[in-house]
Image (cartoon, coloured by chain):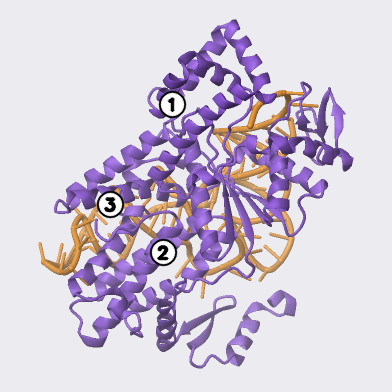
Amino acid sequence: MAKRLGKNPREVAEQIARSVDVAGVCRNVKVAGPGFLNITFDDAFLAQQLREMAAGESLGVRNATVAETVVVDYSAPNVAKEMHVGHLRSTIIGDALVRMLEAVGHRVVRENHIGDWGTPFGMLIEHLIDLGEDGAARELSVGDLDAFYKQARQKFDTSPQFQDRARQRVVALQAGDADTLRLWNLLVAESARYFAQVYEKLDVRLQHADLRGESTYNHLLASVVERLQAANLLQRNDDAEVVFPAGFTNRENQPLPLIIRKKDGGYNYATSDLACVIDRVENIGASLLVYVVGAPQAQHLSMVESVAQSAGWLHSPARMVHVAFGSVLGSDRKMLRSRSGEAVKLVELLDEAVQRADASIREKNPELDAEVRERVARQIGIGSVKYADLANDRVKDYVFDWERMLSFDGNTAPYLQYAHARICSIFRRAGESRTSVRGVVPIVEHPAERALALALLRFDSAVHDALDRFSPHRLCTYLYDLASTYTTFYEHCPVLKADGELRASRLALCDLTARVLERGLGMLGIGAPEQM
RNA sequence: GCCCUCGUAGCUCAGCGGAUAGAGCACUGGCCUCCGGCGCCAGUGGUCGCAGGUUCAAUUCCUGCCGGGGGCGCCA
C-alpha cells in the first residue's frame, strides 16, 4: 500500500490510524514498528461475535465465494496388491480435503482411481486359474494380497510357459474375452471388498461407488487419440503415437514425448489420464481437478495438464491441481519399511495404532468401560496416525514415530482429543446441557478469556487458509493453537467454581471451543470422543 | 547431465515479504495436589545450508553453489 501511494509505510499507517472510525469494534488503533497497525478489539464486540458464531451451525466458517464442482482423485491402490504406507498419505490427505471442501459448500466428487488394468493382469488371472477360483477367492479374502501377487510374479519370473500364458491372457483381456473378463472381475471384486474394509478401518469417506478404475476409461481411449489427431497434436515417433508438450526435455535435451499409444498398439496411463480429464470436465462438469498423488508424479501430471490444455479440454476456469506429498520415513530417515525390508502393510500399521492407543487408555483411565474404550481406542489410534500425517507440511517427507504421535503432549491428535473430552467432562459435572449455554453472550475480560475468544474467531480464516493451499496442516496448526490457548484458559479461569453469569459465560466459551475442536477434527477425518 | 523438491534450536516440526524467528519433546529453575492426567509458569538453546541479488524491509522472492530425496519415452 505504501508503495502504491509512494509514501513511507509509517506515515500511511499513521494516517489510517487517525482517520478510521472503529467505534464499537476496536478500543484503539495504534501504529507500531515500521508501519503496523495494532488494533485492539472491544471486549463487547468480541463477545457479540462469539455469540453469533455459537448461534450458527457453521461456527463462523463462510462458504466459498463460488461453489465449484471439485473432483478429488486420491488413494488409488492396485487390485490384487496389498495397501501399504504409500497409500496412506494419499488416502488421508485426500479424505481431509474432501471434508474441508464440502464444509465450505463445494460439490465434491470423490474418485478412487484404482489400478485395475494393464499387463500384470495376465499373470494375476493365470495364477487365479492355477489356484482355482474358490481357492483364489479364499486367498484374496484373507487380505494377504501381497502373497497372491508375489506368487504370480514368482511364476512369471521363473516359468517361460507361465509367462506365455500370461501374455496370451493379456491379449484376451484386452480383446474383451468373456471368460477372461469374468475372472478379471473376480479379482477386482475381491480387492474392492478388501479396500472397503481398510477404508472402514481408516474411517475414510471412500465408498464402493467412488471406485473409478482405469478400466472405466478403456472405451474412451480411442476417442482421445482421435481428438488429439484432430487437434493436430499427435505425432509418430519411433513407431509410437505421442504428443510433445512444450518445455519438457529428456536427458539429452531432446523434446520429451507423452506416449499416447505404444508401438505395440496398446494405450498407456497417460492416455487414460487424459480420458479422465475429459470425463471430469465434460461429463462431470468439474472446474477443479485435484490430484492427491506423490511428488514423483509431478512431471507426468504436468505433461498431462499441458496436453489437455493444448487440446482445449482444460480451459479456464477449469484447472488441475497436483496436491503432492512426500514420503513416510522411519526413524533412520529412510523410507519406512518393515523389518524384512518390505513395504509396511497398511492394515498392520492401523491395527498397531489402535492397540497402542488402547494400552494408553487402559493406563490413563482404567475405569472406562470396555465397550467405550474399544471405540475410543479406534478414534485415538487412527486419529493419531492421521493427524501425524496431516500436521506436517505435505510436500515434505515426515518421520513416523509411534511415541510422538500417540503422546498426549504436543501437536498430536490425543492432545486435541483430550482437550475436547475434558470440556465434555466439565459439562457432565456441571449438570448443564451443552446447548443450554449457546445463547449466552460471554464475558471477555481475563487475558486468557480474550486470547481464547480471538482464537475461536479465527476458525473461519484457518479453514480457508488451509483450503487455499490444499494444506490440511494449516488447520492442524490452528487447532493445536486453539487447544493450547484453551488449556491456558482452563488453568487460569475456573469454570465450575465460578458463579452465576461468569460461570455461564465460561461454560459458553468451553462449549464453543469443544464445537470448534470437534468440527475441525471432523474436517480432518478424526473423531472427538467425549471421554477417553 | 537436465528438471523438481527439501535443508529453521540437540530431536520432531511451524512460520513463506514485515516488528526481538515460534511450538512440542529434551535440559535448567520455580510453583502446584487443581473442574480428568507427572500439571502450571519461567529460562537455556538459532550466523533460518552457503554466497550473491531484488526491496525501505528477505527465513520468506530471484540466481549460483553445497548437501539429502525424487524424476527424466513405450510399467502404472
Look at the image and give the colour of chain A.
Answer: purple
Q: Residue at coordinates 28% horizontally, 51% vertically from top-left?
A: A376
Task: Say if A292 sits above or below A520 in the image.
Answer: above
Q: Which residue is mark 2?
A: A519
Task: Say if A512 sits above or below A260 in the image.
Answer: below
**Amino acid type at mark 3:** Val
CA separation in Å, label 1 and label 3: 30 Å
Task: Say if B66 sits above or below A238 in the image.
Answer: below
- Asked whether B52 or A115 is in front, the reply is A115
* Secondary structure found at label 1: helix
| First in sequence: mark 1 vs mark 3 | 1
Quadrant position of the C terminus of chain A in the picture: bottom left
Q: Is residue A448 left or right of residue A472?
A: left
Which of the chains is orange? Answer: B
> Label 3 near label 2: C-beta < 8 Å?
no
- Asked whether A511 or A487 is in front, the reply is A511
Q: Quadrant of residue A245?
A: top right
Q: Is residue B48 left or right of residue A3?
A: left
Q: Which residue is mark 1?
A: A140
Q: In the rendered image, is residue A6 in sight?
A: no
- Which chain does tag 3 point to? A
| First in sequence: mark 2 vs mark 1 | 1
Rate crowding at label 1 as few (under 14), some (14 to 19) or many (20 or more) other CA atoms within 10 Å: many
Q: Which residue is mark 3?
A: A376
The mark lying in front, picked from 2 and 1, is 1
Q: In the rendered image, is residue A452 in sight?
A: yes
CA separation in Å, label 2 and label 3: 17 Å
> Label 3 near label 1: C-beta < 8 Å?
no
**Amino acid type at mark 1:** Leu
Q: Is residue A229 left or right of residue B27?
A: right
